[in-house]
Amino acid sequence: MTLDREFAAAALSSLGLGPRTRLLAVCASTEDWDVLCSLGFTDVVVSNLDETFAPLVPEGAWSYQDAQSLAYDDRSFDWVFVSEGLHHCRSPHRALVEMYRVCRVGIVAIEARDSPLVRLAVRLGMADAYELAAVADQGFRAGGLDNTSVPNHVYRWTESEVVKTLRSYDPTGEPLIEFRYGLRLPTAEATGGRRRVAGRMSRPVLRAMSTVFKRQCNQLAIIARRPTGLYPWLHMVDGQAQFNPGYRR
């Protein structure tokens, strides 16, 4: 999937970050670089498994990184960003927690959202279960699972999956998570004539439904900040969170 610039920019702009915010973009392309630069960020690293992007950004602004195993220390960046990239990973959840691990403040992830309406669209052939187009766009050589020629499953998230994943990764405090919703109309990626026509006809209905029922939208912006404190059953000992023997329910 290509980057939805408007939706991604709106999620990032809502954070009110300063231009010198240290940012890492994973599963990124030159589109991500362009969006981040257009928002005024000056300390950005874009990373990917695809080295063809390296010469297209300034020296030092690109890094070869597997989002599922980032070669950075904990809290190396203020914020970590991904757009339409986690579903290319063999383990989207592992990539999400890796982003969370190397962030100091928080993460922004723009991904496809799971819902009854989206599942119906997949059954009707209006949305893809596997992303064949991404591989075709890369000359059938890359662009799929872990940037191979094998088309990846389009993993679509729910809010509860995000919450459970981050709580499991870091059970020391409550992550501060908010969700924003967007609609990506099927005509944006429709390739066949039938899909294009059906997508055009369904536009008014989809717009109306997504306006009234936000959770039927097919795009999800995940904004997750690190906890502001420990859970009450924990305390710090020599810089490490440990169970507090004095805690009483």
Image: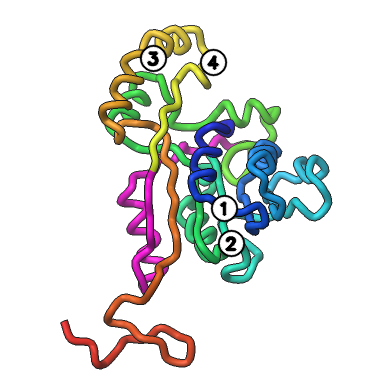
**Which stretch is magenta?**
150-179
The coloring applied to the image is rainbow
Q: CA distance from mark 3 to mark 1?
A: 34 Å
Say whether marks 2 and 1 touch (CB < 8 Å). yes
| Type of amino acid under label 2 | Asp
User: Residue 149: where, in percent of width, then height?
Assistant: 63, 36
SS assignment at label 2: strand
Q: Based on the displayed image, in which of its 4 quarters is residue 136 positioned?
A: top right
SS assignment at label 3: helix
Picture layout, residue 138 above or below residue 92: above
User: Residue 202: where, in percent of width, then height?
Assistant: 36, 13
Bin the neighbour count of mark 3 within 10 Å (Cα to Cα): few under 14, some 14-19, many 20 and up: some
For the point 56% across and 47% down, which residue is it?
A: 82
| Type of amino acid under label 1 | Leu
Mark toward the start of the polypeptide (4 vs 2): 2
Check disc 3 and report the residue beneath it. Answer: 203
Q: Based on the displayed image, in which of its 4 quarters is residue 180 positioned?
A: top left
Mark toward the start of the polypeptide (1 vs 4): 1
Q: From the viewer's perspective, tell me whether residue 147 is left or right of residue 99.
A: right
Mark toward the start of the polypeptide (3 vs 1): 1
User: Residue 215: where, in percent of width, then height?
Assistant: 30, 35
Mark toward the start of the polypeptide (4 vs 3): 4
